[in-house]
Image (cartoon, grey):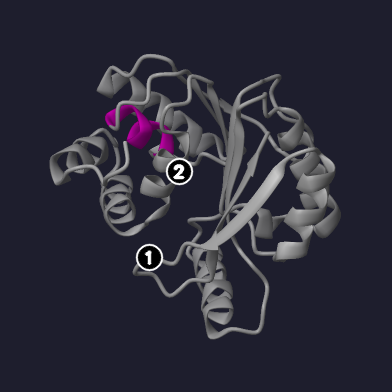
Amino acid sequence: MNTPLPAAALKHIASLSAKRWDRCYTAMKLRSDPVYTAVTRELAGSALPVLDIGCGLGLLPFYLRESGFTPDIIGFDYDTRKIASAQVMTGQGGYAGLSFMAGDARTGLPDFGGNVVILDILQFFTRVEQETLLHAAAARVEEGGKLIIRSCLADDSTRFRITVAGDWFAKLTFWMKAAPVCYPDRALFESVLSSAGLRVRAEPLWGGTPFNNHLIVAER
């Protein structure tokens, strides 16, 4: 579970998408984004289930399954089209223990205990909403579990400006329903998650991308 999936496995995941655009996006995303290998590495050896908040098309759950991760995974996202697509892909791939549900993280999360993942959605929340979501996510991390977050961190770097431009492009092309609202900084994660009793560490997760993405891992 510590090495990238072979090309054949990535192609298989992409082939499950019913729409051509989703197939092309999935193939490109899985090949180029380092977050899937990073999350898989963090979850290696865990027997706890996973709640993937903001799961989109379900690429992380599918990647984890293809990597040999067997605990149950729940995908949660407010985009009903993407949830419907993830459900179809689950059936096409014959994946067991994967479920996907639509809902708005601003109004509450599913009852859950285990590992929690939040990838690339915090910039669409206000600062207060970010704090509320982080508290709710931390409360769902069980002993021995992790809250794994990938987020752009607000700073004065060129990478940050490129990330903002990319998020607005995703909005203008209708891939994302929402426009960015507020980018979190490192202090937010350290204060909120430490107060929730989690040990917090953060590291750059740029890979070959120009974006100011960081991996934040909080362990109980």
- Tell me which label, 1 or 2, sits earlier in the chain: 2
Q: What is the crowding at mark 1: few (fewer than 14 residues within 10 Å), some, or many (at least 20)?
A: few
Foreground residue among 105 and 40? 40
- Residue at image location 34% in from the left, 69% down from the top: 208
In terms of image quadrants, where is residue 8? top left
Which residue is under mark 2? 39
**x, y percentage for residue 108?**
77, 31
Residue 61 appears in the picture as rendered: yes
**x, y percentage for residue 99?**
48, 20
Given the current orientation, which residue lies at the most extreme left position? Answer: 8
Q: Quadrant of the C terminus?
A: top right
Give, as a single range, the part of the protein colored magenta: 60-66
- Residue at image location 80% in from the left, 40% down from the top: 135
Say above or below: 25 vs 113. Answer: below
Q: What is the crowding at mark 2: few (fewer than 14 residues within 10 Å), some, or many (at least 20)?
A: many
Which residue is under mark 1? 207
- Considering the numbered disc 2 on the image, is that residue within a helix, a strand or a loop? helix
Residue 184 appears in the picture as rendered: no
Say above or below: 24 vs 134. Answer: below
- Residue at image location 66% in from the left, 64% down from the top: 180
In terms of image quadrants, where is residue 215? bottom right
- Residue 65 drawn in magenta: yes
Amino acid type of the residue tagged 1 in the rendering: Gly
